[in-house]
């Protein structure tokens, strides 16, 4: 298991903004030519998994939801199709936001808010969310060639800042195990549930190619406000 001060992964271009700018410029061009929104990170089943959990918990449809690293914005489109009305997506790549705006326009989902934002340096506007969702963004942050450890810690501080006390953080990762994610988010967050993901068998051992966890924000350093019972906006269901 990776410790809090270790570099668990080799640095990669996947952790840099120029890589994603170029990737989304290509996807934007492809969308303009073919109407294809591009890759869905972790596949459609990852979106279904998230939406099923929200529905199971009877999360109010007007709950404020933030998609961290929204990319093409397809997750937000699916949330809107399922009735959610207070949706925001951010990405540090302007090309990604241009693409997600085009997808939003095509789908007629004008109520979705899209912003160019670096989650590691969030603006004051980015606060008060009841649900935060990450599908692969923390993975990318972890691959940054420039002080990935520090950036991971800043990610947690940013999450404390934008997520309301008692709010929920749903993360899907292909780089981190459950135990490693518990360690990374140990300051100010408690795990609520591990969501089922596809399993594989190799060498007689069974494992998961993807980890999906739900955390709840407690009183954490860098966050705003104290946790009280009244801040919970729905009752967890087992």
Image (cartoon, grey):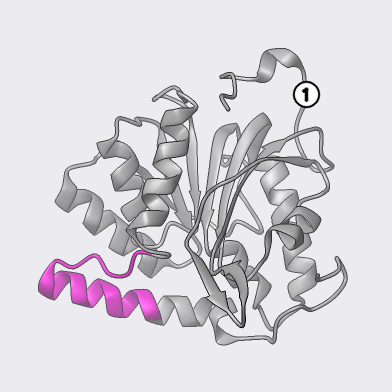
Residue 64 visible in rendering: yes
Q: Quadrant of residue 26?
A: bottom left
The structure residue drawn at horizontal position 77% and vertical position 27%, both measured from the top left corner, is 225
Q: So how many labels did they put on this image?
A: 1
Please state the horizontal and vertical placement of residue 43, each as a whole percent of the image.
36, 63
Q: Residues within 10 Å of mark 1 (few under 14, many from 20)?
A: some
What secondary structure characterizes most of the magenta part?
helix
Task: Name the residue that disc number 1 marks.
Answer: 227
Q: Quadrant of residue 163?
A: top right
- 78 to the left or right of 108: right
Residue 73 visible in rendering: no
The structure residue drawn at horizontal position 61% and vertical position 83%, both measured from the top left corner, is 203
Numbered range of the magenta stretch: 23-40
The structure residue drawn at horizontal position 72% and vertical position 42%, both measured from the top left corner, is 160
Question: Does the magenta segment cover residue 26?
Answer: yes
Q: Which one is nearer the viewer's eye here, 42 or 123?
A: 42
- 180 to the left or right of 111: right
Question: Does the magenta segment cover residue 1?
Answer: no
Please state the horizontal and vertical placement of residue 218, each as a whole percent of the image.
77, 33
- 76 to the left or right of 169: left
Q: Which one is nearer the viewer's eye here, 59 or 73?
A: 59
Please state the horizontal and vertical placement of residue 32, each as a whole percent of the image.
15, 70
- 93 to the left or right of 138: left
Above or below residue 178? Residue 164 is: above
Placement of the C terminus among the 4 image quadrants: top right
- The kind of secondary structure element at disc 1 is loop
The structure residue drawn at horizontal position 47% and vertical position 62%, both measured from the top left corner, is 198
**Residue closest to the far left:** 34
**Residue closest to the far top:** 230
Placement of the N terminus among the 4 image quadrants: bottom right
Q: Quadrant of residue 113?
A: top left
Please state the horizontal and vertical placement of residue 35, each as a whole percent of the image.
14, 66
């Amino acid at each position: 298991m990776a410790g809090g001060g270790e570099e668990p992964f080799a640095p990669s271009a996947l952790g840099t903004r120029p890589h994603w700018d170029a990737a989304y410029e290509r996807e934007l061009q492809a969308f303009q030519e073919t109407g294809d929104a591009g890759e869905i990170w972790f596949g459609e089943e990852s979106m279904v998994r998230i939406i099923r959990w929200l529905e199971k918990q009877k999360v109010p449809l007007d709950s404020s939801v933030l998609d961290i690293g929204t990319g093409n914005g397809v997750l937000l489109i699916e949330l809107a199709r399922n009735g959610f009305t207070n949706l925001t997506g951010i990405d540090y790549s302007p090309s990604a936001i241009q693409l997600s705006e085009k997808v939003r326009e095509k789908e007629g989902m004008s109520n979705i808010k899209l912003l160019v934002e670096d989650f590691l340096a969030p603006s004051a506007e980015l606060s008060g969310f009841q649900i935060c969702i990450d599908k692969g963004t923390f993975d990318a942050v972890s691959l940054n060639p420039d002080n990935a450890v520090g950036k991971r810690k800043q990610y947690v501080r940013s999450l404390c800042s934008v997520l309301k006390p008692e709010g929920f953080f749903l993360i899907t990762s292909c780089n981190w195990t459950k135990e490693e994610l518990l360690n990374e988010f140990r300051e100010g967050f408690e795990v609520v549930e591990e969501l089922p993901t596809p399993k594989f068998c190799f060498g007689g051992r069974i494992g998961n190619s993807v980890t999906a966890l739900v955390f709840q924000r407690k009183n954490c350093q860098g966050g705003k406000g104290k946790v009280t019972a009244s801040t919970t906006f729905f009752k967890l269901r087992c």
